[in-house]
Amino acid sequence: MDIITTLINGLSMGGVYAMIALGYTMVYGIAKMLNFAHGDIIMVGGYTILVFMNFSGMPLLAIAMAVICCVILGIVIEKVAYKPLRGASPLAVLITTIGVSYFLQSLAQIIFGSAPKMVNIVDLGLLQIGSLKIQMYTVLTLICTIIVMTILTLFVKYTQTGRAMIAVSEDRNAAQLMGINVNKIITITFAIGSALAALAGLFYLLKSPSISNTFGSSPGIKAFTAAVIGGIGSIPGAMLGGILLGLVENIVAKIPVLSPYVDAIEFSILIIILLVKPSGFLGKKRREKV
Amino acid sequence: MVINNQRSRLSRIKWNHFANYIVIALSTTLFSILSFSGNLKISTIYLLEKISISILLALSLSLVVGFLGELSLGHAGFMCVGAYLGGKTAALLEPILGNGILTFIIAIAVGGAVAAVCGFVIGLPALRLKGDYLAIVTLAFGEIVKSIFQNTSADTFGGALGLKTPRYNREYLFIYAFIIVIVALAVIQNLMRSKHGRAITAIRDNEIAACATGINVTKYKLIVFLVSSLFAGIAGVLYSYSNFQVQSAKFGYNYSIEILVMVVLGGMGNINGSIIAATLITFLNLKLATVLTGDLAVLQNLLYSLLLILIVIYNNAPALSRVRGKYNLKSLIAKVKKPKVDPAIQNDDKAYWANIPTKIEMDEIISVDATPQDPYKADPPKKEK
């Protein structure tokens, strides 16, 4: 029974990682940049939930406001910091994203202080099936992740905007020639990624209800690892990588000898996978042309 | 090409190549005199130690980021390895050799060597991975190192409480540290001015082209990672000496970013810029820490991040390329200092091409009356309107 609980916890954790990883992977696929500030958007989402819960006490309103704030923030960051650098060297863009991440973290610390704050959104209780006891939020997280991913997959496959996204990620110039507004598509990608980050922030808060200014950095880095393991730029890859990482984390934490080294093991897996298969599990191998 | 033999040997030394050594050496001498005569406060000595550590870190990171063009986000990880291994060596040797210069040198050697080995090991995947992926691997390396040292037992590396290292005489430490800085500067500057340095910058500018011209990309990437992590490790040993203890929590992602900020603010690929930025940021960090307390202390991080974003956008945005050409340090200096060399008597590779008249006006052609026997005299440089 313990094994099943661990597996379900792992799947649910993996779902959250996958949701964050989707933000990384979609931005990478479409804008060809690594957005290191993505983890901090989770933090902003968390703080928005905190503020609106204290304000109104209505969880649904707080969640909706978190999604809206994160979407606006994502778009603003894209327009102000990343758009001027389109066409510049990848290193410059990478450093700017790091700068944005640093900026958001310090701003949050100035506004909210460095001491962790508690957020009690809603108490969901325990689910009991026979002798199996599972936290209710785990199940909720799992269900929500599945719904979100299904919607996202359908959106990318069957809507015009989604197909435009695929086109831009395949070949930006050709997509532009076909009449796709590339700037608009990139903005939409950032908006979707940020909305997913806000949701991930919510699920993270359900699991551990304390938030500080570095709230987003640990899940951010781990989801990023997940995106790379699955093959960055690939949407199913991000899902696979996220779930894999969630499972590994929860299983390793149950083994007493290895449990202090959870982080080290996760990152070692990343390095090994990159060495064996540099493009990740489902990533496309890009050949360089001169 | 005309070589002027009359110029003395001394005047042919390119003094601007040595300016940074001289400045650092002079200021070190000055501060050591002050220190020995007892005029230096402990806080100033501490500041000097921190500055030397930051300069070492910025120099070594600028080798990877500025010259090789790869992003390393785990530089603090190499420093962490050096700090723990060097600190442990010093703690072990203290009862045998005493707490003198010998122990210090051995600690530096061990810390630097182990960090260099780590750099080599991280450099190996770097051969297969490029750009973003390499940044991820270095980031992962930093986190792994931090996590491993955090979970060691109390009698090996101190675990979460940190490793205690022997106390060293404050008056000498910063002098040794600056001597190491000068050595590091000499190694890195000479490496970059040599044939190997040109190869490294060629890899940064276009790896495929560099490969095609026969540059051994593998070899040079490994060299860069090795040298860079060696000095980062040495900086770590200095850190352990300066702080009397090492805690792995310090060497996280944020510290790596702080070093990166120094390199970017100083101008990527600019050694003197990195040194100045490292000095300034360390100085400001320590000074602001006394003024801003509590959560306001983050105000400086906010400032750094804003500066980082603005500088990168200003230096790299394609839309700003014309503004950049107009307002930069080089053109400002050129405006103040007029070139005084005669374009006719200088090496081809140093010619100030803007001064060489290329347009011949009509009346000049008509008034040509020189015979082949006449010595050639170049036209005086024209001022642009």
Image: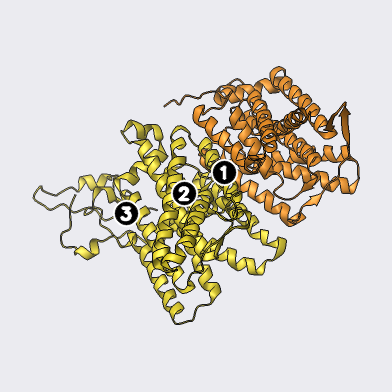
Chain colours: A orange, B yellow
Question: Tag 2, which secondary structure?
Answer: helix
| Dot placed on the residue nearer the N-terminal end, 2 or 1 | 1
* Amino acid type, residue under disc 2 in the picture: Gly
Q: Is residue A185 above or below residue B63?
A: above
The numbered disc on residue B144 is 1
Tell me which residue sits at (73%, 52%) in the image. A108
Label 3 to label 2: alpha-carbon separation: 21 Å
Image coords of residue B290 (percent x, y): 64, 69
Q: Residue furthest top?
A: A158
Label 2 to label 1: alpha-carbon separation: 43 Å
The numbered disc on residue B325 is 2
Q: Is residue A107 left or right of residue A125?
A: left
* Amino acid type, residue under disc 1 in the picture: Ile
- Observer-side mark, 2 or 1, equals 1
The numbered disc on residue B382 is 3
Q: Is residue A179 above or below residue B351?
A: above
Q: Is residue B240 above or below residue B136?
A: below
Res. A205 image quadrant = top right
Q: Is residue B14 left or right of residue A272?
A: left
